[in-house]
Amino acid sequence: MKKRANVVDSPKKNGMNGVTEQPESTVLASLARRPTRRDKGNIGSKISANQATPVATSDSVIVSWDARGDQGGLPEFLSFLDASLVQHGRTAAALWGMTTVDMHRRTAMTNADLQRVIANLPGYDLYVCSPAPELEALHPNLWTHLQVAIPKFQPALRAAFKTLRWDAGYLTELQPSVAFSTSHYYIGSSKFWVRYLKFLRDTTSTISDQAPRSTVRFLDQLTKASSLVAASHWSLFIDRLLPIFLRLNPSGLKVARIPISAAEQKMNTHLRKLREMKDVAHRTKSQWMASCWLHYRNTYLLNVAGREWCQRNLPLMTPSSIRFY
C-alpha cells in the first residue's frame, strides 16, 4: 500500500498563501522531539566530505552527512549545495537532497526507506518533512519557536525582515501544519534547487550587505540554545524560509510532505487536538477557533511547563492579533 503525504499545491492556486493544507486526519510529521546538540546534523555546519554517504537510484540521490566537530557556516553550506547541484545535474537522478546521518534514530527511517516513499509519490518537485510534530500543535509557526528558543533572535529577525522589505506579520501569523518543514530533509528536483538556491543567495546577500552590522554579527554566531542543533544563527534563519519562498515565488512547484509515522505515535491526545484545532482555524479562517486554540494551548502549557515558563515564553509565541498564512 502506498503511503500518503500531505501535499502542498502550486502557490498560484492559493495566491499569497503558497501552502495548501489537507484534512487534519492526513497530517503527518517527522521528529517526535526537538534535536539536541548531540545531533549536530545541521544545514549551517560544514559538510564532512569523509562522512558524506550518497544513496542513489536512477531516480534520486540522497546524501547523508555528519557535521560533528565542524563549525563552518553559511558559505560552506551554500557552496556544498551549489556543488551538489552541478554534480547531480550530470547524473540520471531526477531528485537529490540530504538527510542527517542519524536519520534512522530520529525518524525510524533510512535513506532507502525515504526513497521508497518518494517512489510511491511521483511527480513532485520537492519532498519535505516536519521538524517536530509538537511544534505544529504549540506554535503559530516556526519563527515563534525560534524566538522562544533564542529570545535575542527577535530583534535580528525584525531587522532582517525590514532590510528585505518583508511583511513583519510573517513572524507571527498562524500557519497550517503542512507549512512546518526543515531543510534537514529536503529532497528536490533541479527545478526546485536552482530557484531556491538563488532565493537563498539573494536573501542572505541582501542581509549581509544592507542589514545593520549588529544583525549580521548575530547571524554569524553559533547558537548556544540547548534545544536546538548546534549551528550558526544563519542556518536557523534559512531553515524557516521555505514558506516565504513559496509565497514570494509562485512558480508552480509541487511539494509533498513525507509521512513519518513513528513520530506521530509519540504525540499525546492534547497535542493532536491542539494541532487539529489550529489547522481547522486556518482552513476556515475562523478567528473564534484560533482564539480557542490559543486558550487551550496556554492551559496545556501552564500544566506541562509551569507558570514561570509560561510567563517568560508565552508572550514570544502569542500573536497580538490573529492573522492567517
Image: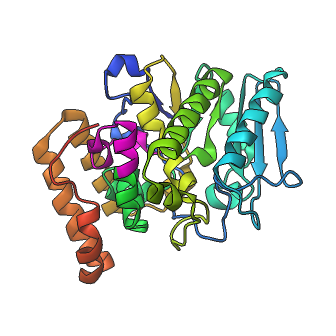
Question: Which residue is pictured at 61% across the width and 32% down the height?
Answer: 197
Q: Which residues are magenta?
A: 159-181
How was the colour assigned to the protein in this rendering? rainbow
Residue 179 seen anywhere in this rendered image of the structure: yes
Image quadrant where residue 243 sits: top left
Q: Is residue 207 magenta?
A: no
Whole-percent x, y for residue 157 in the image: 39, 52
Q: Is residue 174 magenta?
A: yes
Side of 27 where 126 appears, left or right: right
Whole-percent x, y for residue 198 in the image: 59, 29
Question: Which residue is pictured at 72% across the width and 48% down the height?
Answer: 76
The total of numbered circles placed on residues is 0
Question: Which residue is pictured at 19% across the width and 34% down the height?
Answer: 284
**Residue nearer the viewer, 50 or 109:** 50
Extreme-left residue of the structure: 288
**Residue nearer the viewer, 272 or 101:** 101
Whole-percent x, y for residue 210 in the image: 46, 43
Residue 3 seen anywhere in this rendered image of the structure: no
Whole-percent x, y for residue 179 in the image: 41, 40
Image quadrant where residue 176 sits: top left
**Residue nearer the viewer, 185 or 168:** 168
Image quadrant where residue 151 sits: bottom left
Which quarter shows the N terminus?
top right
Which quarter shows the C terminus?
top left
Question: Vertically, is 281 above or below 88?
Answer: below
Side of 28 where 296 appears, left or right: left
